[in-house]
Amino acid sequence: MDLTVLTYIVVGATFALYIGIAIWARAGSTGEYYVAGKGVNPIANGMATAADWMSAASFISMAGLIAFMGYDASVYLLGWTGGYVLLALLLAPYLRKFGKFTVPEFIGDRFYSKTARIIAVVCLIVASLTYVIGQMKGIGVAFSRFLETEYTTGLLIGMAIVFFYSVLGGMKGITYTQIAQYVVLIFAYTVPAIFISLQITGNPLPQLGLGATIETGASSGQYLLNTLDQILVDLGFTEYTKMEEGNTFNMMMLAMSLMIGTAGLPHVIVRFFTVPRVVDARRSAFWALLFIAILYTTAPAVGAMSYFNLIQTVKGGAATEVESTLAYEERPDWFRNWEQTGLLAWEDKNGDGQIQYYNDANEEFAQTAEEEFGWAGSELEVDRDIMVMANPEIAQLPNWVIALAVAGGLAAALSTAAGLLMAISSAVSHDLIKGVFNPNIGERAELLAARLSMAGAVIVAGYLGLNPPGFAAQVVALAFGLAASSLFPVLMLGIFNKRMNTAGAIAGMLVGLTSTLLYIFTYKGWFFVPGTNMLPNEPEYYFLTIQPESFGALGALLNVIVAYLVSRATAPPPEHIQHLVENVRVPRGAGEATGH
């Protein structure tokens, strides 16, 4: 069957499933809209959380980063998975025991302040909107390939679909839709990986294939990673398995930012409000991490193998020969297909009609290439976010596998976008409108406000997604930094420090959010507008070599320091608030056996 027809069938079937679930599980009350009635099974919630978590950054972009960055990209694997341990141990059970609908509601009640709640809403919206920009980039990539159109058109169509089923179903519909999306995305990610691992190494497990030997071609009998290292060095790049010199401190800061950002993400935390009991919150975190691990242990192999296949293609199948090139007129069909999206481009800089791909930023290598081969610069521009979805096409896998990869990419981007939009919608309708400005609003009016705020969030996120400040995973890392610097510290201090008061929490959130935003805008541009950055986005200009994606850890430290100092310089919280904090931390029934 023709690839285009098959892709329409597979993607259409999954969309029909998602929309059908949204209609079946549509929310009829605010409890169902915000927290799915608090009746979701821990295993089901773990699966939904995994889908909510494994966004376009995980499915589409992370392996692309690994492909082009090699060892340095492992920090994303460590940071994003390590954060779930913090979430399971330090936040999820206590927040579920507190029993509120949203993160700002917890902050408002714990710090007995509507002002604190409003600031928490601002922090949530800033972090979530930045995060959803990354999802919109993924949606645009997936839909542009699926519909064989430009990126902008694909993004607009994707916005309309995610808006429909998110607004209709609320958290209840989103939860059950995400369970289906998890099944689709994990199947779509692992099946092509198994095929390609068998094709290159003969090993059906990609995790083992990454360390195995190549079975075919001129590199037969050599280890895959060793071969990839040599190919990249021959093309003027750094070894795939080598960390960039002087990058250790920045990698540590990025890992910390991603970890505590994970634990502070509102759209992930709210998933633990949907389970019946406190113990189920811990169980959900365990199941979520298990389901996530399936993809995250596969990603390094997908990154390495997709990059190996890409270079094999553009080097005319002779990746071990530097001077070997592919004639542009003989480019394969997958190359032509992705050119239509604008995410893959070729420029004939020396007029020979051949595709030259090498590291022309390496001045010594570029000079040698010009003198020996007549090359005038690298001619291939590859958007890293296409690697996972282009991988099955590059490897010439069956059409149904290619169609499945498209469906998986769409499932990943749509599932997280829906969760983020739900968090923004809840913050506006429940925390601002009902919690601050109109406490007597009726349930139907509150639901209408929630849906209208979600519509506004879709439009804003889509607009910003037209010009994202980086690859999907990099944009998501910025969002994690914002959550790390603003929300995670105040949640931790609110649970584990009964002396923390309103003034300290407000001061900490403002300092953490403001410092991180200013750092991002300094190097990325104001509101992500190109050319408005105050300093070049280059390592030599960074403060202590900390890149914008890594600053969240330092912002969190500033948050904690300021919150602690301000709280000690002002009056302590009321007695009933201090007792509330103690009750949240102590398990039910504690002390009954001894009478204490």
Image (cartoon, helix red, strand yellow):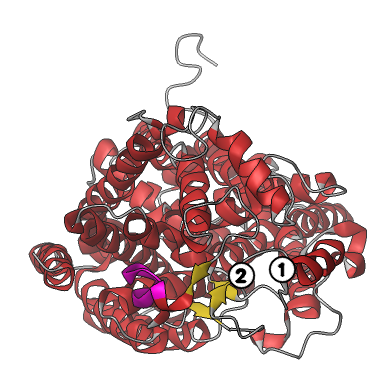
Decide which of tag 1 and tag 2 comes sooner along the chain. 2
- Please name the amino acid that badge 1 sits on: Phe
- Compared across the picture, whether 578 is left or right of 163 comes to right
What's the residue at 54%, 35% (across, down)? 224
Residue 428: percent from the left, percent from the top?
A: 44, 78
Q: Which residues are magenta?
A: 330-338
User: Residue 75, which numbered label?
Assistant: none
Image quarter of residue 166: bottom left
Residue 567 visible? yes
Residue 258: percent from the left, percent from the top?
A: 63, 51
Q: Are marks 1 and 2 in contact (CB under 8 Å)?
A: yes
Does 505 appear in magenta? no
Does 337 appear in magenta? yes
Residue 427 visible? no
Q: Residue furthest top?
A: 594
Residue 508: percent from the left, percent from the top?
A: 76, 62
- Label 2, on which residue? 356
- Label 1, on which residue? 373
What's the residue at 55%, 65% (across, down)? 325
Tell which of 582 and 345 is nearer to you. Answer: 345
Tell which of 21 and 315 is nearer to you. Answer: 315
What SS does tag 2 mark?
A: loop
Residue 242: percent from the left, percent from the top?
A: 74, 41
